[in-house]
Image: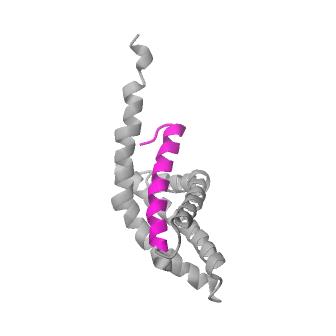
């Protein structure tokens, strides 16, 4: 998949965009705000979530997930195991942090309605991971990998040797 920093950035942006878009709509539905907020409020919520998710992905969760996944799959030669392990580690880490973010944002907007922050968090995390994991493994991961290899990676291969023609 990505072999350079630029490609990693492009891949990460695509993946974050897709995952945050779907998970934002899912959480609007869960919180009962899916027809209650304005379009602009929805876009702003998405943009803030996207920026936070990308920062987490690029600087914290991504590097940690890759390190753990590469250690777990060190004895295998099958690339699919490494890809799946990285994806699973990413979802676990991102759901962990983005659930905290979502809970904070929800409580800021609606006020605190419970005394058990840990129970509330575990509920939010469980609801998020149960959707995020299959979304990543079955839908978004394959779509983003297809788009990346078809349109981003192939452009480099097509035009990468332009100087060797002359």
Where is residue 63? Give x, y as percent. 56, 52
Quadrant in which residue 165 is drawn: top left
Horizontally, residue 162 falls left or right of residue 8, namely left
Which residue occupies 49% across, 61% down? 20
Task: Determine if residue 25 is in view.
Answer: yes
Where is residue 24? Give x, y as percent. 49, 66
Quadrant in which residue 98 is drawn: bottom right
In this view, the residue in front, 21 or 39, is 39
Q: How is the model colour-coded?
A: one colour
Task: For the C terminus, give its image quadrant.
Answer: top left
Which residue occupies 52% across, 38% down? 6
Q: Is residue 74 above or below residue 25?
A: above
In this view, the residue in front, 84 or 34, is 34
Which residue occupies 44% across, 16% down? 163
Where is residue 89? Give x, y as percent. 48, 61
**Please, which residue is most extreme toward the top here?**
166
> Which residue range is magenta in the image?
1-28
Q: Is residue 87 above or below residue 165?
A: below
Task: Determine if residue 77 is in view.
Answer: no
* Residue 17 on the magenta segment: yes
* Residue 15 on the magenta segment: yes
Horizontally, residue 9 falls left or right of residue 76, namely right
- Secondary structure predominantly adopted by residues drawn in magenta: helix
Task: For the N terminus, give its image quadrant.
Answer: top left
Where is residue 111? Give x, y as percent. 65, 83
Quadrant in which residue 64 is drawn: bottom right
């Amino acid at each position: 998949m990505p072999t350079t920093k630029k490609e990693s950035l492009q891949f990460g942006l695509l993946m974050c965009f897709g995952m945050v878009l779907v998970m934002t709509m899912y959480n609007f539905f869960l919180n009962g705000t899916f027809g209650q907020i304005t379009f602009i409020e929805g876009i702003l919520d998405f943009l803030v979530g996207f920026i936070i998710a990308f920062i987490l992905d690029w600087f914290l969760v991504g590097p940690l997930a890759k390190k753990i996944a590469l250690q777990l799959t060190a004895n295998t030669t099958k690339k699919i195991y490494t890809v799946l392990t990285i994806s699973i580690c990413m979802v676990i880490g991102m759901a962990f942090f983005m659930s905290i973010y979502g809970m904070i944002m929800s409580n800021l907007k609606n006020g605190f309605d419970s005394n058990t922050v840990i129970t509330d968090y575990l509920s939010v995390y469980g609801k998020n991971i149960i959707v995020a994991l299959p979304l990543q493994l079955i839908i978004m991961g394959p779509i983003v990998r297809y788009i990346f290899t078809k349109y981003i990676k192939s452009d480099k291969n097509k035009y990468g040797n332009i100087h060797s023609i002359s």
